């Protein structure tokens, strides 16, 4: 009986210490001549836009866009695009077989700053998207 109580207590402690991440939200790059914006919706849909900046720093209309569905498993985000419903003249990118890692990095200092959440694309059929890092908006 003592062993059963001990195991039950340990499991409840582990469950209460487990962290869950709110992955949904808006992610973007800052700076540079190209800006990327990714929106992950709670219903499992996503929308991606790539903007080319004008010389005065004003954003242009999205030059390349994509949409589809996403799911998360162990901090890996899997993206998919249905060619029949998600690809049209406005959304031309096919995100099938695209993966990104969710990173929730803590700040090194001891202040009350929020952790910096970001996504880093590491595998995609879209050659230029590999290695892009997007930070979550607060």
Image (tube, rainbow, N blue to C red):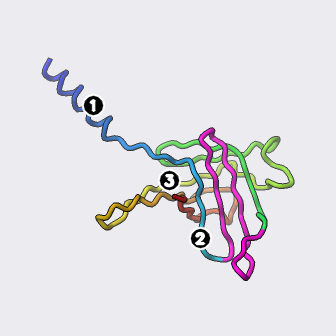
Q: Position of residue 15 (x, y in %)?
A: 32, 35
Q: Quadrant of residue 16?
A: top left
Which residue sits furthest top?
Answer: 1
- Label number found at residue 30: 2
State the extent of the magenta-drawn residues as a range: 33-60
How packed is label 1: few (under 14 Cα within 10 Å), some, or many (20 or more)? few
Query: Which marked residue is nearer to the observer: mark 2 or mark 3?
Result: 2
**Helix, strand or loop at mark 2:** loop
Please count the marks in the image: 3
Q: Gap in Å between the C-alphas at discs 2 and 3?
A: 18 Å
Query: Observer-nearest residue: 131 or 9?
Result: 9
Dominant SS of magenta comes to strand
Classify 36 as above or below 24. Answer: below
Horizontally, residue 89 falls left or right of residue 35, namely right
Q: Which residue is mark 1?
A: 11
Q: Mark 2 vs mark 1: which is more N-terminal? A: 1
Provide the secondary structure element on which disc 1 rests. Answer: helix
Which circle marks residue 102 in the picture? 3
Q: CA distance from mark 2 to mark 1?
A: 42 Å
Mark earlier in primary sequence (2, 3): 2
Point 66% across, 43% down: residue: 45
Q: Is residue 84 left or right of residue 104?
A: right
Residue 43 magenta-highlighted: yes
Locate the N terminus and report the quarter of the image it occupies. Answer: top left
Point out the frontmost of discs 2 and 1.
2
């Amino acid at each position: 009986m003592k062993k059963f109580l001990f195991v039950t207590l340990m499991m409840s402690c582990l469950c209460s210490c487990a962290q869950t991440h709110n992955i949904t939200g808006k992610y973007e790059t800052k700076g540079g001549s190209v800006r990327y914006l990714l929106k992950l919706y709670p219903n499992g849909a996503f929308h991606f836009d790539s903007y080319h900046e004008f010389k005065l720093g004003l954003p242009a209309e999205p030059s390349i866009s994509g949409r589809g569905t996403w799911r998360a498993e162990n901090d890996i985000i899997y993206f998919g695009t249905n060619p029949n419903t998600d690809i049209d003249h406005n959304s031309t990118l096919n995100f099938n077989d695209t993966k990104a890692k969710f990173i929730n990095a803590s700040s090194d200092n001891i202040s009350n700053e929020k952790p910096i959440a970001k996504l880093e694309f590491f595998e995609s059929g879209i050659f230029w998207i590999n290695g892009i890092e997007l930070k979550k908006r607060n």
